[in-house]
Image (spheres, rainbow, N blue to C red):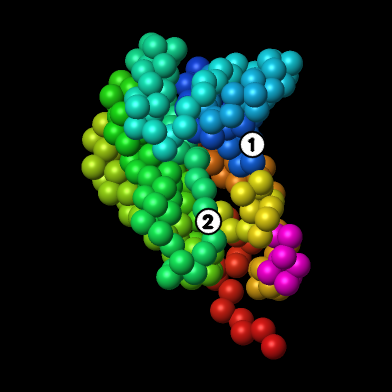
Amino acid sequence: MAEGNTSSRSSKWSLKGTTALVTGGSKGIGYDIVEQLAELGATVHTCARNEAELNECLNQWVTKGYKITGSVCDVASRAQREDLIARVSSEFNGKLNILVNNVGTNMQKQTLDFTEQDFSFLVNTNLESAFHISQLAHPLLKASNNASIVFMSSIGGVASLNIGTIYSAAKGAIIQLTKNLACEWAKDNIRTNCVAPGPIRTPLAAEHLKDEKLLDAFIERTPLGRIGEPEEVSSLVAFLCLPAASFITGQTICIDGGLTVNCLLLQ
């Protein structure tokens, strides 16, 4: 009996036999998410805009023995999103256990400086693409009878950080999308959660973190006293996809070293 219980507990921490789609998996947090899911036993498909970067990653993963495939896709394109899900459906025989909507981008301007084109680009890339991919993937997720969606938001979606109003608004909308789909799709055995990273050492954040004054300000306000690493975010994403997290849905978890809960006014 004890051995059986141990085996049962062990299976809760494994993704063996599952399938996953991670958007934007060629660098930063997305790259680490792909690796973490593959290490836990999932068969993963990822996508990226840059074919050369994607192929370099795929070669690395083959060397490591991971079951990972990839295709070129700009998630800002509706047609390419449709092609991506058709590819995934064919590759995974119409069933998908895990969808990680990871792609995001930003441009930092003051509100009055944003153009109509800026607004459309940021909302399409950060919000509409995740919404549409989830719509397209729903039949595959439902068919697996045990599915998990993880959205990538930002602490900019829960607090004012002066990192761009359009980006922050789109990331705030992702949090509401998470809550609504968690309730609407629970009947289809689809769990939906959201991860909201704070300052993390990624290519997207690199330019901002070059500003030593800004970097120091983040570190001062962060109780853990440092910037986060991509693998710390990917570990949380992987956990939310595991059977061990089977009763967690509709949640947004900030992974920010305590930044968003620190109300201390620094002198």
Secondary structure at badge 2 equals loop
Secondary structure at badge 1 equals loop
Q: Is residue 214 magenta?
A: yes
Q: Is residue 149 above or below residue 252?
A: above
- Please tell me which of labels 2 and 1 falls first in the chain: 1
Q: Which residues are magenta?
A: 209-216
Crowding at mark 2 (Cα within 10 Å: few <14, some 14-19, many 20+):
some
Residue that mark 2 sits on: 107
Judged by its main secondary structure, the magenta piece is helix
Residue located at (72% from left, 65% from top) = 211
Tally of numbered tags:
2
Q: Position of residue 187 (x, y in %)?
A: 24, 35
Q: Quadrant of residue 56?
A: top right
Q: 174 or 213: nearer the eye?
A: 213
Horizontal side of 248 relative to 4 (left or right) equals left
Q: Residue flagged by tag 1: what amino acid is it? A: Lys
Horizontal side of 142 relative to 261 (left or right) equals left
Residue located at (57% from left, 44% from top) = 236
Q: Position of residue 222 (x, y in %)?
A: 66, 68
The answer to whether residue 69 shows anywhere in this view is yes
Horizontal side of 1 relative to 129 (left or right) equals right
- What label does residue 27 carry, if any? 1
Crowding at mark 1 (Cα within 10 Å: few <14, some 14-19, many 20+):
some
Residue located at (43% from left, 54% from top) = 118
Q: Residue flagged by tag 2: what amino acid is it? A: Met
